[in-house]
Amino acid sequence: MSYVFTPAIASVPVVGRAERFPVRRIYCVGRNYVEHAKEMGFTGREPPFFFLKPADAVLVVNNGETGTMAYPSLTSNLHHEIELVAAIGTGGKNIKAADAKKHIYGYAVGLDMTRRDLQGEMKKLGRPWDIGKGFEQSAPIGPVVPAAQAGDVEHAGIWLQVNGKDRQRSDLSKLIWNIGEIIEHLSAAWELQPGDLVFTGTPEGVAAVVAGDTLVGGVAGVGELRVRIA
Ligand code: MN
């Protein structure tokens, strides 16, 4: 097969392998920690909801490196959201929460970078969030750690510092919808495929960053992600 131009395939490195993880879709869960839901003006356990980012929104940051994210256009309120990312290795529809692990290739640390001012305007107008969530470099991500090599992600600490100061610090056990439940709900709405990434939500403490800031975040047993805003 040939193409009228060379297609670009987004991909993420895999720890311990030369082969990369090709990215098909990026699904994100909204408001999945109680304290973050509260800071966004919501309470209670609403059904999980999802939005997508384009695959090429990934900004790959190798282990030990600091990625550079250009401060995006049209915003003056760029927010960080540190998240555990599940990387799907085996697709499926209507996957039960109890079977979800079989579909996960591995885990990564990601940032769901958000143009909060634009997202807020769109919310107010009842319009799609894409402009607030799905822009270039809006998904900085570290290497995928194969599931067998990752720690106990269900109970792992998750944290983010900006310029060495704590901004977000929580635990994956505080997810409103756990990883299995997320995959059950997601796969009822979309047929998951190998290469899908699932951003599982962010804990409280989201706030703005500006050019020159350095973000360092991590999930225990998965890794650390460093990004500088240029
Ligand atoms: Mn998020």
Image (cartoon, rainbow, N blue to C red):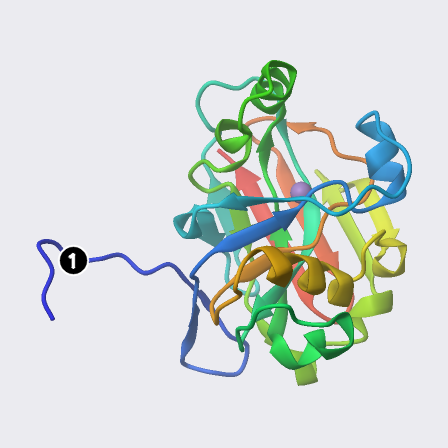
| Residue for point 72% across, 57% down | 218
User: Does mark 1 have its CB less than 8 Å from ligand 1?
Assistant: no
The vertical placement of 223 against 34, above or below, is below
Judge whether residue 146 can be spotted in this image.
Answer: no
| Residue for point 51% across, 74% down | 14
The vertical placement of 115 against 100, above or below, is above
The residue indicated by pointer 1 is 6
Judge whether residue 150 can be spotted in this image.
Answer: yes
Q: Quadrant of residue 109?
A: bottom right
| Residue for point 71% across, 38% down | 162
Q: Quadrant of the N terminus?
A: bottom left
The three-letter amino acid code for the residue at tag 1 is Thr
Q: x%, y% of residue 192?
A: 53, 65
In the rendered view, does 107 fall on the left or right side of 17?
A: right
Q: Secondary structure at mark 1?
A: loop
User: Is 226 in front, or is 126?
Assistant: 126
